[in-house]
Every structure is written in C-alpha cells, then in structure tokens.
Amino acid sequence: MNNLKLYSEVSLNLDLLASKQETLLFSALDIERNRLFFASSDNNIYTTHLFSFQDERAWTKNSISAEVEHVDLEPGDFLTSFDYLMEKEALIVGTSSGLLQLHSVDSNATEVVGRVEGGVRCISPSPDGDLLGIVTGFGQILVMNHDWDLLYENALEDLPDGVDVREPDLSSTYMFESPISWRGDGKYFATLSELNSSASLHKRLKIWERDSGDLQASSESKVFQGAVLEWMPSGAKIAAVYDRKSDNKCPSIVFFERNGLERSSFSINEKIDATVDLLKWNCSSDLLAAVVRCDNYDSVKIWSFCNNHWYLKHEIRYSRQDGVRFMWHPTKPLQLICWTLDGQITMYNFIWTTAVMENSTALVIDGSKILVTPLTLSLMPPPMYLFSLNFPSAVREMTFYSKNSKNCLAASLSDGCLCVVELPVPDMWEELEGKEFIIEASISETTFGSFVHLIWLDSHILLSVSHFGFSHSNYSSQSSSSKDELLGFYLQEIELVCSEDHIPGLVTCSGWHAKITKQNSLEGLLIGMASNPAKKCSAFLQFEGGKIVEYTSKLGMARGALKDDDISFSSSCPWMSVVPVAINGPLKPLPFGLDDVGRLHVSGKIVCNNCSSFSFYSKLADQVISHLILGTKQDFLFIVDISDILGGKLELKYENFIHVGNKRSKEENINFINIWERGAKITGVLHGDEAAVILQTNRGNLECIYPRKLVLSSIVNALAQGRFSDALLMVRRQRIDFNVIVDYCGWQAFLQSASEFVQQVNNLSYITDFVCAIKNENITETLYRNIECLSLPHQKEDKDVQVSDFNGSDANKVSSVLLAIRKALEQHVPESPARELCILTTLARSDPPAIEEALERIKVIRDTELSGSDDPRRMSYPSAEEALKHLLWLSDSEAVYEAALGLYDLNLAAIVALNSQRDPKEFLPFLQQLEHMPSLLMRYNIDLRLHRFEKALKHLVSMGDAYYEDTMNLMKKYPQLFPLGLQLITDPAKRGQVLEAWADHLSDEKCFEDAATTYLCCFSLEKAMKAYRDCGNWSGVLTVAGLLKLGKDEVIQLARELYEEFQALGKPGEAAKIALEYCGDVNSGISLLISARDWEEALRVAFLHRREDLISEVKDAALECASSLIGEYQEGLEKVGKYLTRYLAVRQRRLLLAAKLQSEERSMNDLDDDTASESSSTFSGMSAYTTGTRKGSAASTTTSASKGRDARRQRSRGKIRPGSAGEEMALVDHLKGMSLTDRAKHELKSLLVSLLMLGGEEIARKLQRAGENLQLSQMAAVKLAEDTISSDILNEQTHNLEQLHKNNERRTANVRGLFLAI
C-alpha cells in the first residue's frame, strides 16, 4: 500500500545549435562521470553533466550548458543508433550506411571501427560490456567482442526458402526501436522477429544464448506493436506490447518467461489507437515505464506490480509535438530523466510513500482511481479495497484531511485538473462497500500549473507548489493566457467552495469551485511540505538542504520565527512528517525527516542512522503522538517513546538502533521486534485501543502485529481513563496478564474501583477469567518491570489506601481483591446461576482458599433442594451438583473433601468423595464408622484426622473425665496444646498434673529455665532445683534450697558443689561469687577473680578484708597480665601490616588479570553469538582470584568432585592459603577479626584502672598506647580494604601503609574514648 510521490523535478533546456528543424534522436549515459549524451538529427553530439540538475540554482535556470561536437558523415548518411561503451570510455555510433564509429568525447576524435552491410538498425551492448549486439538492415544479428571481432552471425527473421537476406529497411519507422534486449546478467538476449511467410503483422519473440548464439526458445506468433522489447534486469520477465486493434481494444503490455511462454499481461487503459513506443524497467525491477502516444498528447506512464496486480502509479503528459522519450538512472531506481525533441530535459525524483493516512485509511493510487480501504474496519489485502473514487484522468498527487468529523480528499490529475471530494465519517463507510464514485473536476477560472506538492491548510484551503512554463506543465485541459506569463515554481493557496450541500452518509463528488487566492514565486527548490498540527492555517516547508520554514496563511513564510527553536534538518529529507506532541506542556509540532541514506532527523538532530521506514502512534483520541514506530535496515522494529526523544534517552535505552540482534538476554526487550520477513516496511498504524502496526512485505501482502509496548500503553491509557471494560477486552485479546488491571495503580486502590469494574464489564464469563488469573505478585515489578508506563510515581502513594474493610490487618492481594469482587457481584449483579458460580470461583481462588465458605453456600443450595420448597429463588441458583463440580474443578479434590469433613456433614463429605472420583472402599467405611459415634467423639476423630488439634482437645475436654487420660496423652503428643489445656481444665489437681507434664516436656527439650518456672507453678521444688542446676543458675538453686528449708550445713555443702562445678566449667567469676558469699573462702575468691580478669573487684575484696598479701597478689598478677598484653598487641600490630601488604598485592594482581580477561571477553562479544564459543564465556569467569560462577552456561560444570572441594573449602575457611581463589576475602576477614571485642575492651579498661590504683602508671600508659595502636591500625586497614574491594581502581599513592599511619592520627581522638585519658 504505497504511492509513488514526485518530490522534486528540474527542467532545463538544451540549446540546439543548428536549424529549428534539428531534433534530439538518441541519448546515452556515462554513469562513472555522470555525463549525459544526446545525438541530434543534424549529427551533433551534446554532452552535459547530471550535476547541472543538482545545482542549488538549477531550478532558476532556463537552459543547460552543453559541449557540442559534430560527427562527420557522408551526404545522405544519418545516425541510426547511439550508445556509450564504458570499457572504451567512448560513444559507439551506427549509421544508415553501415558505419560503426567510436567517438571519444574527451579528445573529440572519431574512429571508424567497422562497416556493416545493409546499414545499422540497432546497437545494444551487453550489461557487462564484453559483447556488442548489432542488428543490420538485412535483418542479421552480429555479436562482437570489445576488440571488434565477430563472434557469430544469425538471421533475425524467419526468411522464406531461397532467400538469404531481406532487403534493407532503415526508414524512420525503425529509427527508435531497440529490437535487442539483454538479460541483467548478460547470459541471454531477446529479439522480436517478423514472419515473412505471410502478409500479416505477426511477430515472434526469440531468446538467444550469449556465447554460442544458439536459439534457446521462441514464442508463438502474435501481433506485437512495433519492436518494443525490454528484459527485466532481475531476469524474471520480458516485457513487450500486443497490438489489439483487431479485438477493438487498446494495446496491452505482456510478459514472457525465458522459455518463450506468455506469463501475464495488463491493459494500458487508453484509446484503441494509442501506441506504446518505449518500455523501460528501472534498475531495481520494481517500476516499468512506457511512452504512450495518444491522439492529443503523449504520456510517460509508470506502473508498479504488487499482489499480482499492476498499478498505474504516475503519469506525466506532454504535447504530441514534444515527442517525449526517457531513460531511468542506472543506479538510482527512483530517478527518471525525460527529454523532448526540442531539447527540454527534465529530471524527476520519486519516493515511495505509504498510502495509509493519519486516521489509518489507505488511499492507493491506481491510474485514474483511488482505492479506499479503512484499515480500522478491516485489514483488506491489496488489490482488494472497500470502495473506489474514479477521476477524469490519472492521479498524480493527493492529500487527505481528517479532523472534526470532516473528511476531504484533494487530488491533482495528469491533465492539470484539481478534484475535491468530501467523504462521510468513517463509521458509515461500510455502507459504501463495493461502490465506485465518479469524481468531477473542480471549476476554476485559472490554471493551477503542474502540481508537485499539495497539502491541506484547513478544511477549505489547499497549499500547493506548482510549476509553469515547461512542456509537461503547459499541457492542461484548461486554457488561459495567464499561463504564458508565469515561469518557474510557485507557492499557491487555493480556496475551495462547494455549491452543493454535504449530505451525511453520502460522498460529495461535484460542485467544487477552486480559486487561487495567493501565489508567490519560490526562492528555492522545495522538497516537502507538511501541515502544522498545532496551529491552524499553518504549514512547514522544507527547502533543498533541509532548511525548514513555517508558512502561515495570513503572514506567508516567516523565516525569523524559527530562530529560537531551530527545527531544520541537516540534509534534504524527502520523507517529512510533522506530528503534535505534548510532554509536560502545551501542544507543539515536532518535525521528522528521513533522508535518502536512512538517517532519521528530529528537530535538528539525527536519532537513527539506519532507518528504512517510520510511522507514529497515538493512544489518545486527539491524535497527540506518544510513540515513534521505526523500522531499521537490519529488519528491526523499534517502539520509541516520544518522551525519550525529547529527553535525550535514545542512546541509553535503544543502543543507537544497531547490533541488538546479536545480544542474548533472559529478559525480553520490549523496545524492539525482529521483523520476520526481510525487507518489510511499515505501512501504517492503528491508533488508540487497537495499538497495531501494519507491515507490508516485499511480496505485497499486509501483516498486522501488536507490539507489547503499544498494547500495554493503550491498556494503561484505558485504565487511567477508568475504562475497565475496554482494558479487559484488550487484555483478553492480546493475552496480557490480567494482573495489570489490578497492579497498575496498586491493588489497594483497585479495591475502591471493584464495583465500577464489575458494572462496566458486565460479563460473568470475563469476570471469572479475571478472578482465576489474580495472583500474589506485582507484575509491574516482575513481568513488566521494564515498561515505563506501568512504573508511575503515584502507585506507591495509592498503596496507602486503607484495606481494613476488606480483610483485616493480614490482607493480601488475592484475598482482598477477590473479596471486593465478590461483594460487588452480590451488590450489582442480579442473582443467577452464573453469578453464584462466579462467587464460588472467588472463594476457591482466594489465598488461602475459602473452601469451607464455598461448601457452606453449596450446603444451603442442597438443603433448599432437599426441602422441596417452591421458592422462586431456586431458579437463581445452580444445582448443588453443578456447584460442587465447579468447585472441584477449581480446587484440589482432597482439600474439598477435608473441608467437607471439617463441616461435620458426613453426607456432604460422601457427595464430594463420589464427585471427585474417589474409590468408595476408601471413604465409606470411615464415614460409616464416624456415623455410629457420638457427636463429640465423631468431631474429635474428624479434627484429629484433619490435624485440627485445638478443636480435638476442646471436644475431648467437653466429653468429661472419662476421656481425661486421652486428653493428657493428646497434650503430651502435641505439646503446643498445653496452654489451651490449662485454659480448658479448671480442676486444681488436674491443672497441677498438666503443669508438671508440661515442665517435664520443657526439661526434655533442654529448656531448663522455663521448666524450672513451670515446676515452681505446680510446687514441684526438687524438680525445679534440678532444672535450675542443669541450666547453671546457682542463685536459683540456692533460692529453691531456702524454699525447701535445708539446713546451714546442707546449704554450704550444696554451695561447695556448685563452686566446684562452675570452676570446672571455666566460669571463675561465678565460682568466685559462690566462694565469697556462701563458702567464706577469700583466698580462693581472689584467685578466681584474678583468673576471670575482674581486676577492680579483686582489688575491692582484698581491701575489704585488709589483707596485704592479697593486695600484693593482685598487683603482681596485674603487672604480669599487662606485660603479656603489651606483647600480644605489638604482635597483632605486625600481623595487621603483613596482612594488609599481602592483601594489596593480591588485589593488584587480581585487577590486572580481570582487566585482561575483560578485554578478551569484549573481543569475543564483538563476534556474532552464533559463532562465539560457549567454552570461552564459561572460562572467562574463572581465575585464581575470582570465584566467578557463570549462570546460563551451555552445560553445568558442577560435579561431585567440585562439591567435595567446596565442602573442604568450608571446613578450612579459617585458614589463609596463598594463591587460592579465596585468599583475598580471607585476608579481609582476618583483618576484621583482629578487632578488640567488647569484653576485651572491658577487661583492658579494668586492668588500667587497677594499675593506676596500685601505682603502675608507667606500665598502664604503655599498655594503653599498645592497645590504641592496634585498634587504630586494624580500623584503618579494614577501611582501606573495604574501599579497594568495591572499586576496580587501586591507587598505589593513597592505598599504602604510609597513608594508613597518617589516617591513624585522625582516628586517635575517636578511639581514645575507649580507654583512659592517661
């Protein structure tokens, strides 16, 4: 669905030197030096350059400079063929007398290379330039090489018997014919041969082999028109023309295969007497152009093939006397060069533009018709369409206006007319299906010239660029003297008025009047125009070079208005669009342009260097653009947020739109899609809730895709507008996770909208699907965490919504949302079986499932059925069996069976078991056994089976003293029941037994403190004293001994036993307290306090008893301990230095190795993933100083041997092994472990105080200094290690021991607070 748009044309006149009767006959092109050659009827050769047409001021010139050289021929001799030989860098000229001349333009020298008897009718070089095909006037084919050696000679025509050659005929009829056409690879060539056996005009197509000259194939004899023949460069088809006057039809273009069989054909749709004089394919084989000569005019028609249909895409009309001819550029498939007999040369530059308009309506040009297809209604593949508009002549340019329910189309025709048609609103277009509307030309008193560009400024104003004064622009169905006064390109405003009233639902085809209200001469070559969507009666004009100027109807072209906001492009962009955007501000226009090399320009910047096509998507009804749809030459489709373009985030998020295909990631990249068919282009977009991108493949068929990013954006837009029903339909259609509806604004906020959701959807089947999909997960943070439109700031605020009304303080997403849906169903949906099943679904899908509540509802339905009442509400509920089967389908049958048992309804449990396909032998005996039990005993057994032990205990207690022993056994088996048992049992004696049993359990569980307390509650003092003794609580033991009223001697004996036990357990502090308080042994107490390093307490006790020997003992021990600690601290300081030095060396080596591995890995990543080795990626994470583990490697490298090594590594974690993978972290751990513990600091401070009291100030100062140095060095070393381990840079000037000591001085004040100020 593309249209061929003419975006620039330049016409120049070649000044002929000779008489007025001189005309141009032939043309040739030198592609290497961009030279264009023409041969005239006066044997003159004109040489000009293609650069002349690309000059900035070419459009202002009337003539083109050319070098003229004359070819000397004998009188009566004239040129019959003309071409350029690239290998010879010269022109080859054939004459009527048979001369073959090689003319060098550079040296102006002519060399006769041969002479052909009968004259030269045609010269055709092969595509590779190695061979030269010549057709003589005798009808012979001569094939020569570039050394002018004749390779072979064949008869072109089938001559009668006895005739060797035909009579030469070099009349003007054959002058412009090219009866030889080569295939693109030069392996074969084709000719048209007359049949001389009869007087008919039948001819035959022949295919010849290049090297041997053998005839490969020939077609059936047909009535061909002239000798027009053209082989497609790709080699697929050979085009010729049928003369169908005998059938009273116009000529048709027919296509043959290489085997001579006819493949297809199409009519040129002209009058019967029209003739086709020339056929040419463009270099890419997708366009076929022809010169068609009619009674009143000549025309250049251009066709395109798509989906087995030939579309007439463009027509350029000339007057008959111009004798127009043309040639395609050999390397530029969309550049056409036309020339006339009198020397006017016009270069046309075309582009392919999408036929899909902004409102997703396809308007495909096909000759005099525009095929209309609203893609929002149906995705009709071309050449199908909904209805068509038939114009008086071929359509050259069109523009469409769709705004405020007004739909207008304006089209410029090849005969110079302007047609306007008003269409009804698209919602009524279905009624127009299959119809064809005849469009009349608008009425105007002046000529419009030849339109090049045409756009709408408003619903009744057109803005056009037209040119006057050239042959093809002067041809018009309208006549006026004003056309002779204008020359060049003009910018025109055309005002439209319709004399007929528009009837809704009908097409207004006639009654339009057009008047030129403004006409200004252009100062530069205009490349493109686009309406300004943000301003009425305004447009943007793009001139050659990319300069953009704003045009306003009242003010004209305002160049100064764009100085502050330069939106011009850096080069000419034939594809130009201006779209409305609104990002945190008012609506403003944003121009986009695509140049010939694939660079996409936006506001003076290049955002993509490999763009092949682009379009835009709007999620709102006001057509404000939210996303750019971009296709790249590597067949990737990117979905780009407009906010990313304006915010400059393209390089970070989209990686310059290149090389993303070789990057494998576990996460789906939602910003681009890999186009599955090579060369597919973006044709259009379906806006709003449709959120679709339409692609057209090279084969012509349409493909509609729904990018996840656009779909989610449209869903979010619907949710933001409160359109839950539309959002749910999109979620279902596009298979999006239903949780997006709940998680978009937070499930807490959705609870407030649950009623609105149910009312809008109003479809219980859809609601059931929604309920079944809800899960306890925020998909905006998991599945769709990369979607920016789902990550909005207000989500966190909405999560503060109160939910206490729904499910209490322990509410979760699933249970709360389903409860809200259930309440909304009960309030807003009438009672029906479907509603009840939906409610059961909400109960079954709750977290945890509310199966018992669901069974209660089923039980009510069952009781109503069993009662046999004629309540009309019975029809509003499903049958109990249906409801139960629905519940079983949603839930685990075992869970439903256990829930039925939990209701103590044995009949319901039996029904559940039968419907869940359980074997009756499994459940019937058990249910029958329960049925014969007393009610409380039955419930006890059911609760015991269902592990509801608290309920089982309550039932046992309710059954009385007869089951007291069973009660005790149950509590002993399940100790968590003891607290409940104490609440249920009120008899003091039995409570004591329960407490003692509980304490025994606690004692068995080694919970001696709790056991002792529980024993005290039941006055079991001996067991309490044993429990205290087991847990090492000597004060509790001696306290209970007092409660037992033991004698003094017994208490002292008990204290001595405890004293010995604590001394044996290595708790000298506790043993010292017992010795001093209960045993009265001061000597042992002091010794134990010294062992416990409780220096202050030992000194206090010694002074308490005024014993100098004890004081001296404490002093000696303190001095000895101080000396020992000083040595330990100094040794520790040396270890800190050694460990840090080793760590820095290991770290430096690791960084160097990691940098080397990273460079190797980067070089591997530059290769394609399919060619890179998996083993290299696995190895790159392994080294002597890393513990890299590669996730997602091709195969697991974990073996039993590696597991064993890991286990041994765990056992030897405390050791440092030089060169091992864990050496670096082990060194850091050792440095951290060398810090003084809180207990060591307390003991050190106590020792310092005692030394000061005993007069050891000097040694105390040494001890404190040693402790400070160790602590400061350790802290600095750890800080240095932490700084370097988190960085990949190691600075030798700052990360060293000297800097460590400097940092120690800064930390001295902070550490000194841990010691004494001495």
Image (tube, rainbow, N blue to C red):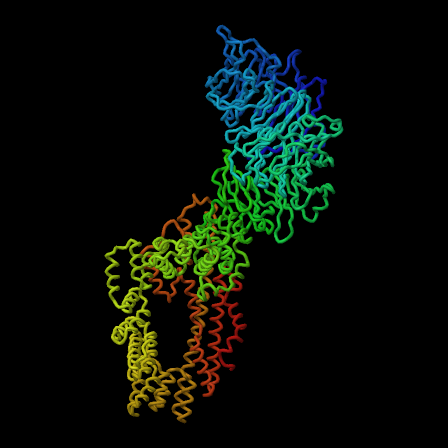
Could you tell me residue 198's position as x and y percent?
51, 9
Furthest residue toward top: 162
x, y percentage for residue 655?
A: 53, 48
Q: Nearer the viewer, residue 776 or 949?
A: 949
Rendered image quadrant of residue 317: top right
x and y percentages locating residue 867 in the rendered image? 34, 59
Q: Is residue 734 left or right of residue 930?
A: right
Q: Is residue 1253 visible?
A: yes
Q: Report the label total.
A: 0
Image coordinates for residue 378, horizontal then vertical, percent: 52, 38
Single out the residue that lies furthest toward the front. Answer: 870
Residue at the extreme bottom of the image, as rendered: 1106
Nearer to me, 951 or 1297: 951
Q: Quadrant of the N terminus?
A: top right
In this view, 753 is above or below 268: below
From this view, report whether residue 905 is shown above or below residue 243: below
Q: In the image, 103: left or right of 157?
A: right
Q: Is residue 1048 above or below residue 1262?
A: below
The quadrant where residue 576 appears:
top right
Toward the viewer: 412 or 1132?
Answer: 412
Residue 282 seen in this snapshot: no
